[in-house]
Image (cartoon, rainbow, N blue to C red):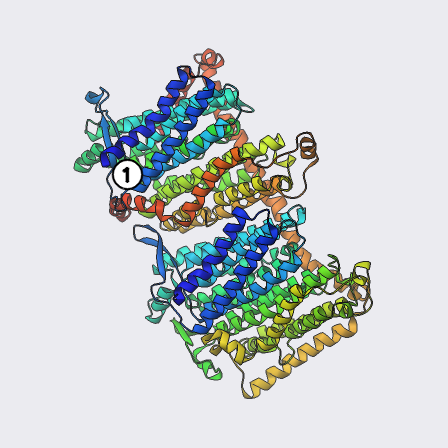
């Protein structure tokens, strides 16, 4: 059974990439969309199956392991796939958001739909690959595979300012990725393991240990490299601009999943391999995240008039909580970050999707030109309110658990920083509710009345409802039953707790 | 079925009802309303079964919800006498209000959303009541905030309703900011957040006390129970349909703050208690002064609710500061000593008095809110009392029951409010004369504004077309009024309250001998002075008599209400929003553009990258940028 599950994991990554290849070879559009639909759906089913099959006492190790030699063995590189307790929730997230983004894209009536789907499939395959990779070379490779289509999609199908946005995103994210690569290669060199296999690297470093100076330098490179990719303040400015311009499915997949690559890298690679480096940087990271991402960006979010930019900024703010959880250097904080990554991925994808649905009806993203839409589209309003409530951390949605556990963990770092972080909850309630009220409640503005007179808005149809329901159901399920996510994470982090304890002891 | 299963059922039933309505009954208002009302009926029935059955503190009623390392959050049920009393109030009064809504909301096009919202509220509120630990109470605390938002926003096409709901949610979140920090601090201080464990630590003198923990936790109560300075959301919340005002903003949710304080009694220290006592006392006085100038029938009741909540909060703060030597004065015997810290003894009399008044207030305030709903319904949605008048004859049942509510709140002997208010006044007299004086003066004001409301609404001639065409509401609406009127009379007697409250009843302080006489005389005097002056002062007219006779005083009282709103409006518009705009400006100028364009310009000046940049080849540019980053990095880490 284990063997076949390992093959299923491989299959989940091969399916979208293979479908992209077939479409590229010139499949007629009619079959192309059907194939794409199947290629978005099957990985989600596989991910659900693998998640259901994952043992309750999963321990710290990897499951569903497989290794394919692609001829790079002499460099210590193998296509080694598998999932541990941290990778499993992320893999599931990628599959669910990919399915929703794919379904939404299928009916998006984008120009050159086939090419759009092709790029989206490559991105999806890359995303699944990132979280299934045990080999850090492929971990990086899959990330690049997903990143390049992002730039192209923003540049071609983007909205306002797409050229500038695409350029800026490319510059920032390429720099971030390269810094991360430098850090990863440094780990490879310093470990002396002669392998990019994370399991081997851990073993080698545990055996010989890395000096404090080495750890500090490598962790710093990784923190800023990954930090740029996750929009650590003040290196975040690509995010609101990029998401503001990106087509909806791209924004869903990037903000929802691909962005988490950096956080995942910090948790899965940097924290266990460079614990002293992490302790060295933790305080600085906490300060940047609390005052930059949470406080400053929280207020900046409040000042936004453009719905998509507002969502982009709010996403930057929520990444602050993730960094804070990492800076807490504890099982609780790290576990909270994994919960928050999954929850934020689902909710931000839902919000970006609904923002597009709103735009279809109002022909604008400008919040000051909307109002009263709930009278015409109650179902859309209900979904948007639910997604907003999720993103501002209302209990009952998955996000709450992530934020709560991060806050509790943070108290040990500093009660004052905890207070700043918790104050962010009030700030996010202000901008979240304000946006919902401006779009949906009160009376429509004159500008909107003119638009709706010309094109009477219809409520959410089933094509838009299905992906929204998938995302919302996931948010509610994990909101009511967080153990489904936290149990494998807790198992995977068990040895980390002793590790963290020794770090905190030294501090 | 075991009693524990009953308790679980009572929590899950309304959730199921809300889910079914949201998924299947959105277009079927009638069906949705029947389902929601039937659910509320079942909740009331089960809450009575649980109460009567007598089993308390079920063993093994806690389940792990989430675990990371040695941190766990559990979902558990604590059903003691306090929860039993509160569950009865929520279940029974809730059911009456649901039933009333069948009539009141009958013609509303969004009935399904309304009744779905009521079911979500019941779920959240019952969660607070049954929660066995602070994290769980916080979870449901936030959820009642959400249901309150949803229901205030019921008429969402009205800008005022949209604004009021937003304000309620955000102000509550400000309170919850402190609440959550308090819970986290309590966790790290004591390693426990479950009420059972905290009590055990208290009994064995292992509880770590800190003034900050109860004060931070109290922030939650300040938000939810609308105490100063976070009282501003409650009057605005009257934008919601009247049954919502009765259920959420009078009888149950706003009282959750007091319930929560009683739950965390064991953590209290003297300094925190005096802050709580003064917060409640000042709120009671302030709100009573605001109530005098209101024209909107619901706004008068809203300020009255604020004032009565202040009474309860003050009662909690008062009772528990009693020093050890004083307990001889009190009949309080059971579980009196519940904590011991730094030489003083914390007593539970405050819990008794606060919960007693919470109970009677739930009955008579729900009664008056529903009565006002009946009046508003009868007057075709006219809410200005000066445009009413003469309703006593046109709406006899509403008038008669409303009168009982008024008599109960002003403390007429032998009605429920008389007993519970006396308990609080007695507590104040024994402990703090200043508080006693303020609360007694507040009682004068209470009878004053209540009799004003009652006289202007029901007596004299009809002063508008709406009022002259008023008609009595149907049985669906008057039946709940009658039941609540009976409870507003009977609820104060130990035969009734003792059955409902069990050991909580034994904590209610009771005056004996000369103290008894003093309190009786004081309370009769304040009631007579307030009620009498209002009755003779106010003339049935289209204008407020106070405004005509003493415009200066009227304006002053009006400003008292306005000042807070103005202050907060100023803060939001002029401070918060401008600060946000400033940061946004800095973000755009210094971060978004300068860095990236500056880098581009540097590259351009060097001349090497210029062509590459403008011909669109990004790679060269990226590598230059990277080189710059590496150089900066090298500087930063001190390689050079």
- Helix, strand or loop status at disc 1: loop
User: Which residue is pictured at 53% across the width and 38% down the height?
Assistant: A301
Q: Nearer the viewer, residue B73 or B1?
A: B1
* Count of picture labels: 1
Along the horizontal axis of the image, is A255 left or right of B223?
left
Dot 1 alpha-carbon crowd within 10 angstroms: few under 14, some 14 to 19, many 20 or more: many
Q: Nearer the viewer, residue B590 or B538?
A: B538
Along the horizontal axis of the image, is B532 left or right of A190?
right
Q: Is residue B484 above or below residue B222?
A: below
- In the rendered image, the quadrant that contains the C terminus of chain B is top left
Q: Position of residue A182 (x, y in %)?
A: 31, 26
Q: Chain of mark 1?
A: A
Residue A211 shows in this picture: no
Q: Residue furthest bottom?
A: B513
Q: Nearer the viewer, residue B564 or B447?
A: B447
Q: Position of residue B218 (x, y in %)?
A: 49, 61
Q: Position of residue B501 (x, y in %)?
A: 49, 74
User: Which residue is pictured at 53% across the width and 80% down the height?
Assistant: B494
Q: Position of residue A262 (x, y in %)?
A: 37, 33
- In the rendered image, the quadrant that contains the N terminus of chain B is bottom left
Q: Is residue A213 above or below residue A17?
A: below
Residue B157 shows in this picture: yes
Q: Which residue is mark 1?
A: A84
Q: Splitting the image into 4 quarters, where does residue B103 fall?
A: bottom right
């Amino acid at each position: 059974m284990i063997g076949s599950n390992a093959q299923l994991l491989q299959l989940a990554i091969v399916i979208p990439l293979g479908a992209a290849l077939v479409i590229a070879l010139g499949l007629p559009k009619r079959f192309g969309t059907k194939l794409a639909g199947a290629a978005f759906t099957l990985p989600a089913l596989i991910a659900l199956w693998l998640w259901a099959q994952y043992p309750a006492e999963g321990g710290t190790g990897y499951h569903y392991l497989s290794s394919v030699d692609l001829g790079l063995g002499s460099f210590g590189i193998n296509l080694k796939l598998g999932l541990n307790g941290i990778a499993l929730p992320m893999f599931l997230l990628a599959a669910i958001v990919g399915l929703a983004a794919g379904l939404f894209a299928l009916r998006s009536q984008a120009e050159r739909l086939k090419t759009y789907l092709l790029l989206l499939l490559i991105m999806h395959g890359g995303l699944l690959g990132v979280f299934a990779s045990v080999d850090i070379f492929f971990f990086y490779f899959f990330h690049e595979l997903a990143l390049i289509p992002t730039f192209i999609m923003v540049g071609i199908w983007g909205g306002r300012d797409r050229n500038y946005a695409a350029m800026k995103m490319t510059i920032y994210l390429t720099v971030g990725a390269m810094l991360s690569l430098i850090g990863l290669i440094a780990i490879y060199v310093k470990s002396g393991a002669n392998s990019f296999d994370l399991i081997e690297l851990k073993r080698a470093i545990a055996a010989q240990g890395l000096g404090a100076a080495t750890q500090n330098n490598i962790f710093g490179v990784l923190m800023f490299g990954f930090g740029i990719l996750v929009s650590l303040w003040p290196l975040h400015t690509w995010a609101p601009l990029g998401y503001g311009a990106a087509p909806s499915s791209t924004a869903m997949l990037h903000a929802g999943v691909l962005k988490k690559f950096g956080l995942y890298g910090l948790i899965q690679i940097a924290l266990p391999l460079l614990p002293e480096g992490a302790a060295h940087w933790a305080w600085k990271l906490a300060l940047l995240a609390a005052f930059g991402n949470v406080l400053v960006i929280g207020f900046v979010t409040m000042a936004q008039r453009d719905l998509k930019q507002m969502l982009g900024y709010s996403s930057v703010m929520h990444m602050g909580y993730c960094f804070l959880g990492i800076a807490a250097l504890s099982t609780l904080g790290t576990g909270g970050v994994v919960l928050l990554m999954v929850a934020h991925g689902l909710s931000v994808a839902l919000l970006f999707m609904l923002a597009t649905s709103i735009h279809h009806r109002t022909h604008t993203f400008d919040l000051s030109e909307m109002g009263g839409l709930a009278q015409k589209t109650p179902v859309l309003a209900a979904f948007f309110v639910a997604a907003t409530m999720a993103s501002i951390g209302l209990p009952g949605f998955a996000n709450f658990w992530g934020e709560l556990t991060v806050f509790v963990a943070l108290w040990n770092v500093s009660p004052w920083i905890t207070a700043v972080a918790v104050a962010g909850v009030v700030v996010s309630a202000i901008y979240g509710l304000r946006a919902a009220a401006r779009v949906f409640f009160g009376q429509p503005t004159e500008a909107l009345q003119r638009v709706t007179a010309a094109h009477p808005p219809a409520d959410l149809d089933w094509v838009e409802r299905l992906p929204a329901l998938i995302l919302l159901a996931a948010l509610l399920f994990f909101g009511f039953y967080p153990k489904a996510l936290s149990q494998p994470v807790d198992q995977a982090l068990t040895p980390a707790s002793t590790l963290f304890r020794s770090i905190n002891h030294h501090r | 079925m075991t009693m524990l299963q009953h308790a679980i059922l009572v929590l899950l039933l309304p959730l199921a009802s809300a889910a079914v309505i949201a998924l299947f009954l959105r277009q079927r208002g009638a069906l949705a309303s029947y389902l929601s009302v039937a659910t509320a009926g079942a909740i009331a029935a089960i809450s009575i079964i649980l109460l009567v059955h007598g089993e308390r503190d079920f063993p093994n009623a806690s389940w792990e919800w989430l675990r990371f390392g040695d941190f766990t959050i559990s979902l558990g049920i604590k059903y003691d006498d306090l929860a039993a009393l509160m569950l009865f109030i929520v279940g029974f009064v809730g059911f009456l209000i649901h039933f009333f809504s069948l009539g009141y909301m009958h013609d509303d096009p969004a009935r399904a959303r309304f009744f779905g919202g009521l079911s979500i509220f019941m779920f959240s509120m019952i969660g607070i009541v049954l929660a066995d630990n602070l994290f769980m109470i916080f979870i449901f605390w936030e959820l009642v905030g959400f249901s309150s938002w949803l229901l205030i926003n019921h008429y969402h096409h009205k800008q005022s309703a949209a604004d009021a709901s937003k304000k309620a949610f955000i102000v509550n979140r400000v309170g919850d900011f402190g609440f959550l920090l308090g819970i986290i601090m309590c966790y790290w201080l004591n390693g426990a957040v479950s009420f059972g464990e905290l009590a055990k630590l208290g009994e064995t003198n292992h509880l770590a006390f800190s003034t900050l923990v109860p004060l931070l936790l109290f922030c939650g109560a300040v938000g939810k129970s609308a105490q100063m300075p976070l009282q501003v959301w409650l009057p605005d919340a009257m934008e919601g349909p009247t049954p919502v005002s009765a259920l959420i903003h009078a009888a149950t949710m706003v009282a959750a703050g007091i319930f929560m304080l009683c739950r965390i009694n064991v953590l209290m220290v003297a300094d925190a208690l005096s802050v709580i006592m003064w917060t409640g006392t000042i709120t009671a006085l302030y709100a009573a002064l605001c109530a005098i100038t209101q024209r909107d029938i619901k706004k008068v009741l809203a300020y009255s609710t604020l004032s009565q909540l202040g009474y309860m909060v003050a009662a909690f703060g008062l009772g528990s500061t009693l020093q050890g030597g004083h307990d001889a004065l009190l009949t309080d015997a059971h579980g009196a000593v519940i904590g011991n810290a730094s030489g003083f003894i914390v007593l539970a009399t405050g819990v008794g008095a606060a919960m007693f008044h919470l109970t009677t207030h739930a009955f008579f305030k729900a009664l008056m809110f529903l009565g006002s709903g009946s009046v508003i319904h009868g007057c075709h949605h006219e809410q200005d009392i000066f445009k009413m008048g003469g309703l006593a004859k046109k709406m006899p049942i509403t008038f008669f029951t409303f009168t009982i509510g008024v008599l109960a709140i002003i403390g007429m002997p032998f009605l429920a409010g008389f007993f519970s208010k006396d308990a609080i006044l007695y507590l104040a007299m024994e402990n703090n004369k200043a508080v006693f004086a303020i609360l007694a003066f507040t009682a004068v004001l209470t009878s004053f504004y209540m009799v004003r409301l009652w006289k202007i609404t029901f007596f004299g001639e009809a002063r508008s077309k709406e009022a002259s065409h008023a008609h009595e509401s149907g049985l669906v609406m008057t039946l709940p009024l009658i039941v609540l009127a009976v409870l507003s009379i009977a609820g104060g007697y130990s035969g009734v309250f003792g059955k409902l409250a069990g050991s909580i009843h034994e904590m209610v302080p009771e005056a004996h001998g000369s103290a008894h006489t003093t309190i009786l005389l004081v309370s009769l005097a304040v009631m007579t002075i307030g009620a009498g002056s209002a009755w003779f002062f106010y003339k049935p007219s289209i204008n407020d008599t106070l405004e005509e006779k003493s415009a200066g005083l009227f304006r002053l009282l009006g400003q008292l209400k306005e000042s807070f709103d103005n202050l907060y409006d100023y803060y939001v518009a002029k401070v918060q929003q401008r600060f946000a705009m400033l940061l946004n400006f800095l973000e755009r100028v210094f971060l978004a553009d300068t860095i990236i364009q500056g880098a581009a310009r540097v590259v351009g000046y060097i001349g090497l990258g210029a062509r590459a940049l403008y011909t669109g080849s990004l790679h060269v540019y990226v590598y230059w940028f990277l080189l710059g980053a590496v150089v900066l990095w090298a500087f930063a880490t001190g390689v050079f």
